[in-house]
Amino acid sequence: MKIRKKPMMVGLIVLFVIAVATAVVLNLPTFGASATGSRLERIQHSPHYKDGAFEYPIPTPTMDPAFSFWKLLRAYMNPLPGQSPAQPLPVEKTDLKVLKGSEPLLVWFGHSSYFLRINGKNILIDPVFCERPSPFQFIGSKRYPGTEVYSADDFPELDAVILTHDHYDHLDYEAITRLIPKTRHFHAALGVGAHLERWGASPGAITEYDWGDRGTIGTDIELIATPARHFSGRGFGRNKTLWTSFVFRTNDLKLFLGGDSGFGPHFKEIGEKYGPFDLALLECGQYNEMWPRIHMMPEETAQAAVELKARTLMPVHWAKFTLGLHPWKEPIERVVKKAGELHLPLMTPRIGQVVMLKDTLLPTEHWWAPLK
């Protein structure tokens, strides 16, 4: 009896080629790098790192167990009407390099990227200016028309870039590589520094934060890393780096930079310990009942601002990419309604609009209302 070895050998060769190709792809710079050495040792000693991964204090599944992968796939294969805008968004093109003065200001670029000029310092949060928040620019949700007018080249010299976590819609490889030459210092969640170093940032220009860690920008701005209920990962592995929110405070201004987070008890704890806040920038978008623990419903966003003791809420994480399964305007419409019920002031600037944070009248225009 003859044993047919040739088909088996062909199968092994195919598997080997696939394994090598996968290894090559995952080694591309856009995927970043894994922590090693002293950085890995610090991660392993974090009280929030258990059994090889970071975790929120209470169970936080990425997907609700009641829903299957096949239901998720079907939902993405059958998009809802209005999931993306049918026309360009109204965007103001501001020359960021000529902004001067000591009055605190903010400029939002859609989704979760925004620029702060406070106490004379230029600060950029979660810069994403790529066409798609994806490891490959030929696949994934494309940014909305109009939002492409800003790029990493538009920024002046930066005193700080703040990075809440390493997801592609918050950490843009191309933007970071172009910002490194003009950035004095990076402030990032624990473990994210490995990505930055691989992309060319100097180790001395990176400060990483575990929850509870404190840092400074110059001598008059304090950062405090606070919890968030989310997850992390750029490749196949998840939760090898931390995700965080930040308390940002000066002598006369206090902001909450929310990053990404599902609703949880941490908001009330942060509000009681560090509040009240002049402004909370909180995610509002990319939610769904299939992943209710890692992103907030708009009504939860408003409630989180109340629990933070925020005087004003600015909803972010919308108006640039379609990553969730809802119409693009739904997040802002729902949070506006809930904020009204809670008597919570909202700030809703246009993309690119300069907002003077000490003004008594902050922008509240419903600029999205006439759009389809």
Image (tube, grey):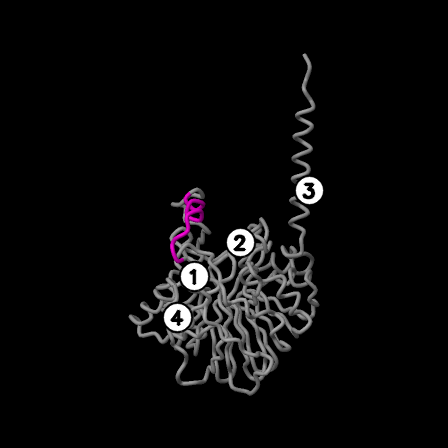
Element at badge 2? loop
Residue 76 inside the magenta-drawn segment? yes
Q: Work out how far the residue at label 3 is from the one at label 2, CA to CA, in angstroms.
A: 24 Å
Earlier in the chain: of badge 1 and badge 2, it is 1
Residue 358 inside the magenta-drawn segment? no
Which residue is located at x 60 percent, y 77 percent?
217
Q: Work out how far the residue at label 1 is from the one at label 2, CA to CA, in angstroms.
A: 18 Å
Q: Disc 2 vs disc 4: which is toward the camera?
A: 2
Q: Work out how far the residue at label 4 is from the one at label 3, CA to CA, in angstroms.
A: 48 Å
Q: Position of residue 163 (x, y in %)?
A: 57, 66
Q: Disc 3 vs disc 2: which is toward the camera?
A: 2
Q: In this view, does 243 lie above or below 14?
A: below
> What range of the chain is rendered magenta?
71-82
Q: Which amino acid does label 2 sit on?
A: Gly
Q: Is residue 70 above or below residue 336?
A: above
Q: Work out how far the residue at label 3 is from the one at label 1, CA to CA, in angstroms.
A: 42 Å
Callout 4: few (<14), some (14-19), or many (20+) C-alpha neighbours within 10 Å? many
Q: Which one is nearer the viewer's eye here, 348 or 60?
A: 348
Contact, CB < 8 Å: mark 2 with mark 4? Answer: no
Q: Work out how far the residue at label 2 is from the one at label 4, CA to CA, in angstroms.
A: 31 Å
Left or right of residue 349: residue 11:
right
- Residue bearing mark 3: 20
- Residue bearing mark 1: 86
Q: Disc 1 vs disc 4: which is toward the camera?
A: 1
Residue 140 circle label? 2
Q: Where is residue 64 in the image (x, y as percent from the top left)?
A: 41, 49
- Residue bearing mark 4: 305
Earlier in the chain: of badge 4 and badge 3, it is 3
Q: Which amino acid does label 1 sit on?
A: Ala
Q: Quadrant of the C terminus?
A: bottom left
Q: What residue type is labelled 3?
A: Val
